[in-house]
């Protein structure tokens, strides 16, 4: 059954087109810096927002019209697989991501859940073989069910730890079955409500313990996806342990997880942490740990994770500058962890929203490549740090100076020549790349 039969495969038509179901900027085969846009962007669709989100919010009932509801949960799950691959096909998106609970009903027992997952992943595997679509990453939802109210690996209850471990094992089995390129951990409940009853060190030791078990199990079954941790400062927990990129890197280093673990960074999580997205990407890149991104945008007037589709070209340009500087994201990619607004409730909005996000990223890529071609920011930084290219600057960088020799130098040269940053002019010239 076709769910989107009135919509043909979305093609690149340029900005002159009046066709809403066309790309205006994303031209998959266009080559930029020696790679096609498709290779640069490695777009992925998120199963949860695309297939299971119903448009409800804390104040209102579901709004989304979706025609894949069946007469049993398993029938709905199978229908969703068909519809999901149709959307991937229509958009020409090569990758997808899911949580275990997105794809199959949890049933009455863990055993039942696992058997549902086996059946649905057989279906997904068959669709992957037919279409050539690939699994960017999967993950285990260890935050929705009441058993996780005190966390999963960080729970005070050892039986909950065991349950989470079983989900991770199954997640890795599925990853192997479907050839997953990455495996994500987002610890929505791995945090605390009150320090009065929390042993933070104990809980974080246990999170690292579960991560190490995952690495060991991957080695055992001969499947090594790139493991990724997705930082977020809060929501649903009051304080989440993987607060931001820097905090998560400290965790990765402390527990000797470098090499196996990188970061999956999300735009709206960055802003919740009080950072710009490019700040988070830059921190990860400096640690050689920029693995993958969850593309979306927040709303500066709202204090929560609104997961909007990215439509701000300044943001995507800064993001693409970081991704290009990183030499790309592979085996990671750009996953649209984004949902349609409650008022965009028609089926076709799923296609339109992804077109908007893909075009905005394509524009960001083009602008970033032009900025790099002109060496606009590169030259600016070269000039800004020029004092380290001569005299005392070179000697400092070569570690040839110490506090005494520098004191001697400063006593003779105590009026440094300062230069203006002309930052306003820089920002104005940057605008020329975006218009
Ligand atoms: C929650 C979030 C998750 C992760 C995967 O804010 O971003 O959907 O991406 O669990
Ligand atoms: Co996310």
Image (spheres, rainbow, N blue to C red):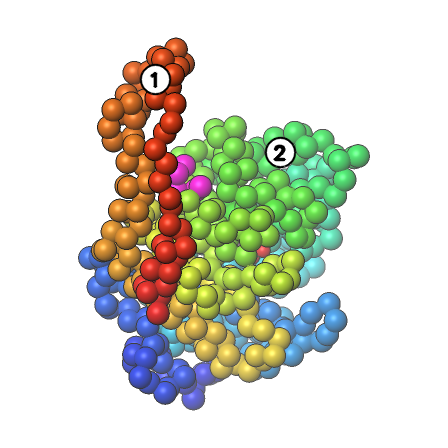
Q: What is the magenta segment's predominant secondary structure?
A: helix
Q: Is residue 58 visible?
A: yes
Image side of residue 46 versus residue 398, left or right: right
Residue that label 2 marks: 204
Is disc 1 surrounded by few (<14), some (14 to 19) or many (20+) residues within 10 Å? few
| Image vertical order of residue 245 relative to residue 276, above or below | above
Please provide percent x and percent y for residue 166: 59, 45
Please provide percent x and percent y for residue 312: 45, 66
Q: Residue at x 44, y 41 (%)?
A: 283
Residue that label 1 marks: 412
Quadrant location, the C terminus:
bottom left
> Which is more toward the observer, 396 or 79?
396
> Which is more toward the observer, 416 or 13?
416
Judged by depth in the image, the label closer to the viewer, 1 or 2, is 1
Q: Earlier in the sequence, mark 1 or mark 2?
A: 2
Instruction: Judge whether residue 71 is colored magenta.
Output: no
Q: Residue at x 67, y 72 (%)?
A: 56
């Amino acid at each position: 059954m076709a769910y989107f039969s009135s919509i043909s495969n979305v093609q690149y038509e340029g900005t002159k087109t009046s066709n809403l179901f066309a790309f205006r900027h994303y031209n998959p085969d266009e080559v930029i810096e020696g790679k096609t846009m498709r290779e640069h962007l490695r777009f992925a669709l998120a199963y949860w927002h695309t297939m299971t989100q119903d448009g409800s919010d804390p104040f209102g009932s579901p709004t989304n019209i979706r025609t894949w509801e069946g007469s049993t949960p398993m029938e709905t799950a199978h229908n969703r697989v068909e519809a999901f691959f149709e959307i991937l096909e229509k958009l020409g998106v090569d990758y997808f991501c899911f949580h275990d609970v997105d794809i199959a009903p949890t049933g009455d027992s863990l055993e039942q859940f696992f058997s549902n997952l086996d059946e649905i992943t057989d279906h997904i595997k068959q669709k992957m073989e037919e279409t050539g679509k690939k699994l960017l990453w999967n993950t285990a939802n260890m935050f929705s069910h009441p058993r996780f109210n005190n966390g999963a690996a960080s729970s005070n209850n050892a039986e909950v730890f065991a349950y989470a471990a079983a989900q991770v094992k199954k997640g890795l089995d599925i990853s192997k079955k479907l050839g997953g390129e990455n495996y994500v951990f987002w610890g929505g409940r791995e945090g605390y409500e009150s320090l009065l009853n929390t042993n933070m060190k104990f809980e974080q030791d246990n999170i690292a313990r579960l991560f190490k078990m995952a690495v060991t199990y991957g080695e055992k079954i001969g499947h090594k996806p790139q493991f990724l941790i997705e930082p977020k400062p809060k929501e649903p927990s009051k304080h989440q342990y993987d607060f931001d990129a820097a905090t998560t890197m400290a965790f990765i280093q402390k527990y000797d997880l470098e090499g196996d673990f990188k970061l999956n960074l999300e735009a709206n999580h960055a802003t919740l942490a009080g950072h710009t997205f490019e700040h988070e990407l830059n921190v990860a890149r400096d640690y050689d740990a920029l693995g993958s991104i969850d593309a979306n945008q927040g709303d500066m007037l709202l204090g929560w994770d609104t997961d909007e589709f990215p439509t701000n070209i300044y943001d995507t340009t800064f993001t693409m500058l970081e991704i290009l500087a990183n030499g790309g994201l592979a085996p990671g990619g750009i996953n649209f962890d984004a949902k349609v607004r409650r008022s965009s409730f028609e089926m076709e909005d799923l296609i339109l929203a992804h077109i908007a996000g893909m075009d905005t990223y394509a524009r960001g890529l083009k602008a970033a490549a032009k900025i790099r071609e002109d060496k606009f920011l590169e030259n600016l930084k070269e000039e800004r740090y020029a004092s380290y290219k001569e005299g005392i600057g070179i000697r400092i960088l070569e570690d040839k100076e110490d506090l005494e020799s520098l004191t001697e130098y400063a006593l003779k040269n105590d009026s440094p020549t300062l230069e203006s940053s002309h930052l306003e002019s820089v920002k104005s010239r940057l605008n020329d790349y975006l218009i």
